[in-house]
Image (cartoon, rainbow, N blue to C red):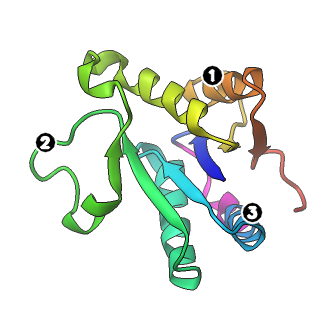
Amino acid sequence: MTVTFFGHRDAPEEIRSTLHTVLEQLIEKQEEILFLIGNRGRFDRMVLYEVKKMKKKFPWLEYRIVLANIPQNGEMPNEEIQYTIVADGCEECHPRYAIIRCNRWLVQKADLVITYVSREFGGAATFQREAKRKGKRIINLAEKRDI
């Protein structure tokens, strides 16, 4: 199963425990799981932190930090290089549109999309709608009350 994430860059810290619970339940139910994680904003950092914690408990799980642009010298910490990829097609795309292309690639690759979307506008809401149009399973942490 491939899981990707979209969330507002100002996602509140209060969702961390719900995110942790959702991730743990997914991992416990799957023999193989790959998390594709963006690298923009608080939500992506929160997801990455929680997934890295989970990898210590479940060493078989896989994750990749997905970039829209090829990093310049020093932009990516050395310990993360082995887990980093650039979304297909972004290297030939104008930097202004690379994030959009990257997000479309993430939607295409995902079996499940975990979001934190609490408002109808912005990139997270746009790509949650695109995932829904493509028939992807979606878990919105902004609506999650019980697991």
State the mark number for residue 126: 1
Q: In this view, does 122 lie to the left or right of 113?
A: left
* Distance CA(mark 3)–CA(mark 1): 22 Å
Instruction: State the mark number for residue 22.
Output: 3
Query: Is 51 drawn above or below residue 84 in the view shown?
Result: below
Farthest bottom residue in view: 57
The residue under label 2 is: 72
Give the residue at x 59% y 45%.
5
The front one of 104 and 53 is 104
Report whether 69 appears left or right of 52. Answer: left
Image position of 129 with respect to 5: above or below = above
Please tell me whether residue 16 belongs to the stretch shown in magenta: yes
The quadrant of the picture occupied by the C terminus is bottom right
Residue 81 figure quarter? bottom left
Query: Distance between the Cα atoms at labels 2 and 3?
Result: 34 Å
Residue drawn at x 57%, y 75% as measured from the top left: 54
Against 12, residue 122 (above or below) is above
Q: Quadrant of residue 130?
A: top right
Type of the residue with mark 2: Gln
Mark 2 surroundings: few (<14), some (14-19) or many (≥20) residues within 10 A: few
Report helix, strand or loop for mark 3.
helix
Between 71 and 13, the one nearer to me in the picture: 71
- Per the rendered image, the range of residues in magenta is 10-18
Ranked by sequence position, the earlier of labels 1 and 2 is 2
Who's the residue at 65% across and 64% down the image? 16
Q: Distance between the residues labelled 1 and 2?
A: 28 Å
Q: What element carries label 1?
A: helix
Sequence order check, earlier mark of 3 and 1? 3
- Of residues 71 and 9, the one nearer the viewer is 71
